Amino acid sequence: MMRLILAGLACLILCGQAGAAEPAPASVLPASVDLRPEFEKWGLSPRGQGERGTCSVFVTVEALEFVLARQRGRGQRLSVEYLNWAANQGWGVSRADGSFFRDCLRGYKYYGICPEEDLPYRDTFDPDLVPSEAAIAKATEIWAHGFQVRWIKFWNRQKGLSDGDLVQVKQVLAKGYPVAAGSDHSRLLVGYRDDPRRPGGGVFIALDSAAVRYTRLDYAWAKANLNDLYWIEGPPAGPEKSAEGRRPRRG
């Protein structure tokens, strides 16, 4: 029975669609949105991936940190190292440093994520790393919040976005959620600004773990180069849910 429940939850996180939060119509979108003040308020300023190829893992963790802070009203750093481990468990992928979004999300759905202090980020990748029982227990608590993934665009071999994809990204940002954006280097989109002087008519603001700062992407560049896109939606703010009855796997 637990296997069936977990399989159903994994399908939900991998197959969700963006319409659930009823974002604003394109015709009434604001000219700019900037979520950086919220990130800073919750102590979620940019942090760096170092020399490792973990950008997609960082983006997924950053999206989870934001929606968790939005739910709790306070920020907490989550473990990139733990999610990198979880993304490598049991999906037919090799032990690798860094993963596609789909592997990160599947790893989270089955194994949860623990606070940063329970498995801190390391300068180098250890393929034999195994989280402690304490870290896995903490991962259960965060996993129980019931966050949902909403896909705007799944990954495919052909990079690039449609005009509709760009509008959906702006709609989600206007709703108050950051958007994970995959490419040769993944980033978390945290705002936008319409500007007819810029290529494509404006810029996206991105939290960038390689640059360790906020960067800007012209709409034209984003349309030509971005690939998979998703965002994470949380339940309405309120008392934290119990983890009882919803346990991630252990090893």
Image: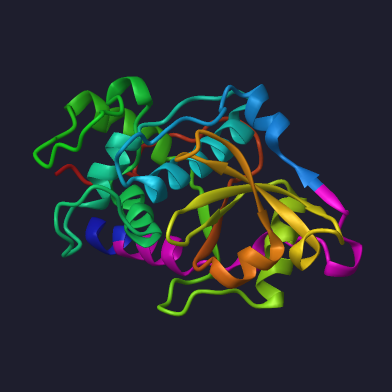
Work out which quarter of the rendered image holds the C terminus and state it: top left
**Which of 39 and 247 lies nearest the eye of the viewer?**
39
Q: Is residue 105 left or right of residue 224?
A: left
Q: Position of residue 199 (x, y in %)?
A: 75, 64
**Which of 96 and 243 lies nearest the eye of the viewer?**
96
- For residue 21, above or below residue 205: below
**Which of 56 and 68 lies nearest the eye of the viewer?**
56
**Quadrant of the rendered image containing residue 127:** top left
- For residue 140, above or below residue 249: above
Q: Is residue 66 left or right of residue 135?
A: right
Q: Position of residue 183 (x, y in %)?
A: 47, 62
Q: Position of residue 159 (x, y in %)?
A: 49, 74
Q: Position of residue 62 (x, y in %)?
A: 50, 39
Magenta-span inclusion, residue 88: no
Q: Main secondary structure of the magenta part?
A: helix
Q: How many marks?
A: 0
Magenta-span inclusion, residue 26: yes
Work out which quarter of the rendered image holds the N terminus and state it: bottom left
Q: Is residue 249 left or right of residue 64?
A: left
Residue at 52% x, 54% y is 148
Residue at 53% x, 31% y is 46
Residue at 28% x, 36% y is 82
Q: Is residue 111 left or right of residue 75?
A: left
Question: Where are the magenta residues, as a range?
Answer: 7-32
- For residue 65, above or below residue 115: below
